[in-house]
Amino acid sequence: MILRKLLLALAFLLGAALMLGFLHQFARSMIYPGSPVPFPRAEQLARRLPAARLLTYRSADGIALRGALIPAGKPEAPVAIYFHGNAESAAQNLPFAEFLASRGIGVFLAEYRGFGGLEGSPTEDGLYADGEAAVAALVAAGIPGERLVLMGRSLGTGVATELALRHPPALLVLISPFTSMVDMGRSIAGPVAPLAVPDRYDNRAKIARVRCPVVILHGTRDEIIPVTMGRALAAAVPDGTLVEVPEASHNDFPGLEDLVVQEIGKRCAR
């Protein structure tokens, strides 16, 4: 009888482990749909943006990474490391970076593992390692830390917020941020979200400990990440600014480029 109970208990635990593994795999497929669009070759990028250059570097766990540096042309200009959303690649943000550079803000488009044709599989710890490597690559390229702005959009706000804790920048800019990935998962998984979502990206728990000014830009019509999440983060930031944009949704954010230039320009001397 005891042996039977033990076997039943083991079978239950094995089934639970398999189910949890399936839930984690499914959750990651939702968190990281990704995009395979790579950066153009160096000569192609140079024809489009003569001052731009591709940087290659590695994460601490050995993943080969790539990013595009689009300088503003002035040695004293701020440089924003941009961490993109989950359904795009860094290369797809070249027009955004080009606009900011034309307005006096340099941009480094940092790519994640598993995106943009790069090797590896994305996870929370993996993306943090990729962000660390991006910061190190810029410092190695001669960009001083006091000129750095960390900027993230959607998924990228989780990376930017973690990096701001580790390497306080001149400014942290969050576009359409979420409170945590678990909170996002509650709309699908309900009360089991804390078990089903393996990657937390707990912005709410971290934001109050960030030691730099924070700007949050959020569309009031955001149908993916509700503006209430942006408001909750702003309420937790001692030195924070929330800008709500009435006509903006998650993927349609009119005037975003001008708004970013305006907010960075207020706080970072150029």
Image (cartoon, rainbow, N blue to C red):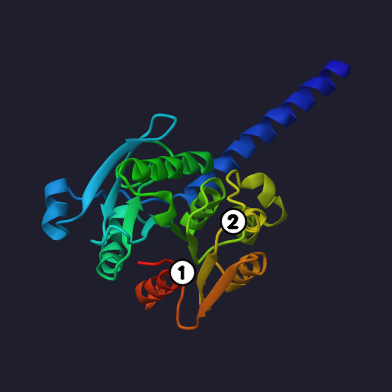
Q: Where is residue 268 drawn, in percent x and y?
A: 42, 66
Q: Badge 1: few (under 14), some or many (20 or more) residues near its Cα, within 10 Å?
A: few
Task: Identify which amino acid the numbered label 1 is placed on.
Answer: Arg
Q: Can you give x and y, in whole percent of width and height, for residue 221 in the image?
A: 51, 78
Q: Is residue 162 above or below residue 1?
A: below
Determine which residue is flagged by label 1: 267
Q: What's under tag 2, amino acid-wise?
A: Arg
> CA separation, marks 2 and 1?
14 Å
Give the residue drawn at x 72%, y 54%.
Answer: 191
Question: Is 12 situated above or below 200?
Answer: above
Q: As drawn, is 104 to the left or to the right of 13?
A: left
Residue located 59% across and 68% down the image: 240
Closer-to-camera residue (259/12): 259
Question: N-terminal of the two: label 2 or label 1?
Answer: 2
Viewer-proximal residue, 66 or 169? 169
- The residue sitting at the top extreme is 3
Residue at coordinates 33% horizontally, 53% vertically from top-left? 109
**Image position, residue 146 (x, y; %):** 43, 54
Q: Residue furthest right?
A: 1
Q: Quadrant of residue 209?
A: bottom right
Q: Quadrant of the C terminus?
A: bottom left
Q: Measured from the top left, where is residue 166 in percent x and y?
A: 54, 45
* Residue 122 visible in image: no
Secondary structure beneath dot 1 equals helix
Q: Secondary structure at mark 2?
A: loop
The reply to whether discs 2 and 1 touch (Cβ–Cβ < 8 Å) is no
Quadrant of the snapshot with the N terminus: top right
Q: Is residue 227 above or below residue 152?
A: below
As drawn, is 128 to the left or to the right of 238? left
- On screen, residue 79 versus residue 241, left or right, reads left
**Circle 2 sits on which residue?**
211
